[in-house]
């Protein structure tokens, strides 16, 4: 099983969008049993809150369903996870500080898998939840393609059984 944790600042917009979008993608690919997918925030600002309603509406408009309760990332999340996917450079730096050099190799910026170095803009500030959805969806698709290059045999087996 491959464990993936999406990370943003508050864990009410981008990272739960990543979690739910990726869950839907792997389910559509017949790979749901191959993954454990979660999300966290680097701050404690929103701990215990649900997905921000505008983010939930955009997800629903794209047929992505699910719920989530915000929580803050802990070092054990990093230790126990295969891939930590951060939404922006600040999240990446915060996670790398927490991870330390021993676990830094599993921490990535999501859009790096698309060949871009830019951040997923925070819709909390931009108000553009559709753009965030589009970026996150593209990042998730590209990440899955990366996983096929890294874990192709296992994923192909899971897909067939």
Image (cartoon, rainbow, N blue to C red):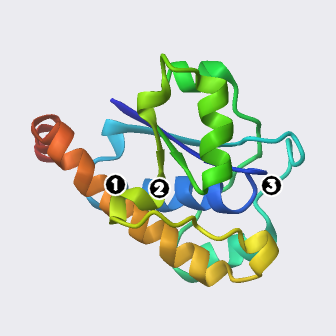
Residue furthest right as drawn: 45
Nearest the viewer among 156 and 150 is: 150
Count every numbered label the image shows and give the total. Answer: 3
Q: Residue at x 71, y 62 (%)?
A: 13
- The residue closer to the viewer here, 147 or 59, is 147
The nearer-to-camera label among 1 and 3 is 1
Which residue matches tag 2?
110
Tag on residue 38?
none
Q: Is residue 88 left or right of residue 62?
A: right
Mark found first going from the N terminus, 1 or 3:
3
Secondary element type, mark 2: helix
Which residue corresponds to mark 3? Answer: 50
Q: Which mark is residue 143?
A: 1
User: Judging from the image, what secondary structure is the residue with disc 1 in?
Assistant: helix
* Quarter that holds the N terminus: top left
Query: Who's the residue at 78% across and 51% down the image?
Result: 10
Say few, some or many: other residues with alpha carbon within 10 Å of mark 2 (under 14 / 14 to 19 / 20 or more): many
Which of pointers 2 and 3 indicates the residue nearer the eye?
2
Q: Residue 79's spot in the image, x, y percent?
A: 53, 19
Q: Is there any visible trace of residue 158 in the rendered image?
A: no
Is 108 above or below relative to 3? below
Q: Earlier in the sequence, mark 2 or mark 3?
A: 3
Residue 28 appears anywhere in the view: yes
Residue 20 lies, in percent from the top left, at 54, 57
At which x and y percent is residue 150? 19, 39
**Could you say whether the residue bearing mark 3 is in a helix, strand or loop?**
loop
Tag 2–tag 1 contact (CB < 8 Å): yes
Q: Is residue 41 above or below residue 56?
A: above
Say which residue appears at 53% left-offset and 69% top-offset: 64
């Amino acid at each position: 099983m491959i464990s993936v944790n999406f990370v943003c600042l508050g864990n009410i917009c981008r990272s739960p969008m990543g979690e739910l979008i990726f869950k839907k993608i792997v389910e559509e690919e017949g790979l749901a049993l191959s993954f454990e997918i979660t999300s966290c925030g680097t701050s404690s600002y929103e701990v215990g809150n649900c997905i921000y309603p505008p983010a939930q509406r955009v997800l629903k408009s794209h047929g992505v369903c699910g719920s989530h309760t915000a929580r803050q990332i802990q070092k054990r999340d990093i230790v126990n996870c295969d891939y930590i996917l951060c939404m922006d450079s600040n999240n990446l730096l915060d996670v790398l500080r927490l991870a330390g050099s021993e676990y830094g190799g599993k921490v990535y910026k999501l859009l790096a898998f698309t060949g871009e170095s830019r951040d997923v803009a925070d819709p909390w500030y931009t108000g553009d939840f559709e753009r965030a959805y589009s970026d996150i969806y593209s990042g998730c698709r590209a990440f899955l393609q990366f996983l096929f290059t890294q874990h192709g045999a296992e994923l192909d087996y899971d897909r067939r059984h």
